[in-house]
Structures are given as C-alpha cells and as structure tokens.
Amino acid sequence: MRVDEYLKHDAVGLAELIREGQVSADEVLTAAITRSEQVDPHLNTTVLSMHAEARRLVKEGRSGPLAGVPFLLKDLFQDYAGFPTSAGNRAMRRVPATRHSEVVRRWLEAGLVPFAKTNVPEFGAKAVTEPREFGPTRNPWNTAHTPGGSSGGSAAAVAAGVVPGASANDGGGSIRIPAACCGLVGLKPGRGRVPFGPNWGEPMHGASVNGAVTRTVRDTAALLDAVAGPEAVSPYPIAPPERPYTEEVGRDPGRLRIGFTDRSPLGTRVHPEAVRAVRDAAALLEGLGHDVEEAEPDIDGRALTEDFVTLWYGSMAALVDGIKADTGCSDDAFEPDTLMLAAMGRARTAADYVRGNERWNNHVRALVEFHSRYDLLLTPTIAGPPVTVGRLDPPAWLRSAERLLVRTRTERVVTATDLVTKEVMNNLTATPFTLMANLTGVPAISLPLHHTASGLPLGVQFVAPAAGEGLLLRLAGQVEQAHPWADRRPGGVPFPGSTARG
C-alpha cells in the first residue's frame, strides 16, 4: 500500500480493506511507519519505537473489529509490558512496564497494532507538549505552533496522517485541547466509562480518563466501543450504553436545546477567532434545526479552577515522591516546573485537599441544573489559536521561585505559592473551558469546526450530561455530515501527491 493510498482511509476503512483482503496488515503497517519517518523530523511526534513488536503482532495475526489497523500509544498511563512508560520523565524512561494497562489490552483485543509511543509534557502537566527530555512536538498545520497537550504527540501524528487515530488521555483537557489545536475529533469520555487500571484506580478522583484523538467521528466511536466498560478494579459499576457507540453515528440526534457561551469562566480575554468559532457553530446548529441560545452554568469558574489545581498540586507531589522512592532518583530527574508543582502540593495541608475536593460537588450540582434546561453546552475548546512553541515557558522570576521552592520546606514555600498560583492561573487563561468537564466527570467533545485566518485549527467544545457520550456522537455525526473536515490536510508538512493546504 502506497502512503498516498494509506492517507485516504480512516481506521474503520482500513480495517474493512484488511478484512476483505484488498491489502495486508503488514502492508498497512509499512505505510504507517513510512509516513511516521516522513513527518517526524518536522514534528517530533514519537519518542519510543515499537516497530519490531508491531511486526510480531502482525505476523501472529490480528482479530477484532479494527484488526491490523496501525495505532500509537500515548506515553502516559498507558503501559505496554516490556516497554517503559516514561511520561516525559528522565527516570521513568528506564523503567519497563511489567504488564499491559487494561485499556491497552482492550485495544490489542480489538486488533489494533501499536508501533510507537507518542510525546507528552512531563507527567502530562501542561497544555503544550515540550518536555525537556524529548524536545517539543510541533503542529503540522504550522510547525512554529504547538499541537497542544498533553496528548500533543498523538494529535500531531493523527493530523499529519501517521495513523487515523491514536490513544490519548484527559485530566484537564488533554484530549480536547490537542484536538482543537490540530483539527481533530477529541472525545473525553465520562468518569468511569473507560478503564484506567490495573495500576491505577481513578486518578484525580476520576477527573482523568483514557480516550483517543481521530480524524472522523466513526473512528472515535469505534475506539470507544473497543475500550468502554468496567474492569475488575473499577470502584463502582457504570451503566452500559443503550447500543454500541458506532451505531450512534448517523443516528438522528433529534431537536436539541443547546446553550452556548463565548465568555471565559475565568473572566479573561477570549480571542475574536474563538468567539467567531462558537458563533459560527451556533449558526450551523440552528440551521440543522436545533434550539440555540446564549446560556452558561451558574458556576464560579475561578473557584472551580482553584479547587482543581489544589488536587493537581497534591497529585504531582505524590507522583514525584513515589518515583523518587521507587527509583532512587534525585531532583535532577525532574523538570523545574514539576518540582515546583510538587512543592506547592506539599505546602498545602490534607485538610486543604479534602475541602477542595468536597467543593467539587457544588460544581456538579450547578452543571446538573444547567443540563435540566439544556441538552448540551457549547463553548470554545481553547480561548485562542494554538500558541507558538515556547510561548508558555515560565518567566525568569518564576524560574527563581522554582529554585527556592525545591531547596526549602520552610514558610517561604507557602509565601511563594501565592505568586506561583497567579502564574499557573495566568497560563490556564489559554485553556479555561475544559476543566469543568473533568472536575464534574461528564463527557465532552471537541470538533474541528473552525480555522483561523492564518489557517490554524480552532475547535469548539460540546459538554453533555453524565452518560451522554452517545448524544455527543449523534450530534457530532450530524455536524460532520453538514460540515465535513476529514479531508483537510495541514500545510506544515508534506503530503504525497498533493500541494493543497487545509
């Protein structure tokens, strides 16, 4: 299979070709690896080769609904036995996993063929993908810009045609933000819908979930069908969907009540392009027969964000301390930003952590009240076009604060946290719309409905009630049919046989 032929198909289409014998799984894998080698010098999407293992899987024979389709694993929380999950960290780069994560095992059961792991910011803690250990991943639409994070390596690879879909996860927007930056479909499943075990139960109290980024809605549905459902270590049962998610695509969503807002939950500036993206999406939805009006949940966005980062700080402290204990590594194995966040977590008390987590219920109730009046919430996915690589690097004063924080455990840490928190909140003004769905545990999807005047993608987000993945896929399928996007090709990397830009 030539690369130009490979690029024409999504995952469902490739699986059908393989199943019908029109092409072999080995030929498809060769095309995927060739495409990766073509674009990675420009983009830096992958950090760990698994080519020999992928060849072994293909030779062994694949079965399942996506048998033989090439795939990429995100290098964070998605273990493949015998290979390290570095999470963008120097110390973890040398630690091979002893068993598959459940989500990886299910993707393998579906017949997918992982052949590499994708780049991530250290421990997925940023909305850009620029780890010190592996270097930055770049956006295939314009390589001066970020593909977002933390699933930036996966998103850049999918947008560049390396694979039709790649694994991702989302603890604060890490599926939806890269999807928005790279012109992709990015569904964050609801809390408990997709397994995270066996090594983890519910990271960040269920705010963090596994998923994928894709070019088509039907691929998103197929990948969700492959992995959805409880596992042995799931802390509570979750009701199964009414029907397979693939059957939702193409199904009439009915006439929906949709509230939309282009105001930042933090009260900060939203770029005119993001405002236009939402307004144009609202007009498209009205044209499809939906009832659309301006409305937003009665949630204090700054309080919600502060409650989220309290848990985030504590999680980073526990993660860093655990890795030090397990590997014997020193502070030199971590990026300064990571050590700063961990120090912030240690500066807070257990009571601070518990009180912050208990306040999450207030935000859940407010969103439930909104969804009693509206089927969906429409917002920008991000507050403006993808930033340039390096744009969110900490300023010099914060670097000095970082050095102070990692050298001391005295009251100076607590004093410094006010300044550091202000800088963290400042960075979150670029991505203020995604945290709510993580904290409340509901599903949300980013769809590639807008490109800026300079040609950069800028997605819009739909937020559903609990267990609303099917509703999101029904609407997404309808919108995709009315406003197709899958054939748009980014102009920042070469495509065989084409000079067209997206």
Image (cartoon, rainbow, N blue to C red):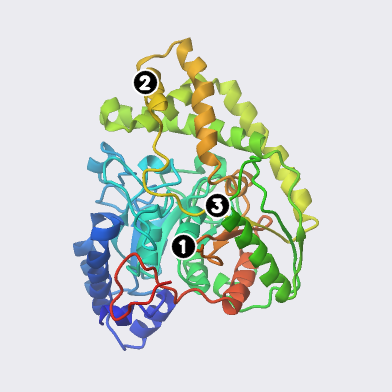
Determine the image quadrant of residue 480.
bottom right
The label on residue 466 is none
Image location (x, y in percent) of residue 478: 62, 75
Cα–Cα gap, marks 1 and 2: 41 Å
Instruction: Kindly identify which residue carries mark 2.
Output: 406
| Mark 1 vs 2, N-terminal side | 2
The label on residue 382 is 3
Is 327 on the left-hand or right-hand side of 277? left
Task: Kindly identify the residue that appears in the image at 26 percent across and 73 percent down.
Answer: 29
Q: Secondary structure at mark 2?
A: helix
Question: Which quadrant is the C terminus positioned in?
Answer: bottom left
Q: Is residue 302 visible?
A: yes
Is 115 on the left-hand or right-hand side of 111? left
Q: Residue furthest right?
A: 373
Instruction: Kindly identify which residue carries mark 1.
Output: 454
Image location (x, y in percent) of residue 306: 60, 33
Task: Kindly identify the residue that appears in the image at 53 percent across and 45 percent down.
Answer: 430
Task: Kindly identify the residue that appears in the image at 36 percent across and 88 percent down.
Answer: 20
Camera-side residue: 454 or 118? 454
Amino acid found under the numbered disc labelled 1: Ser
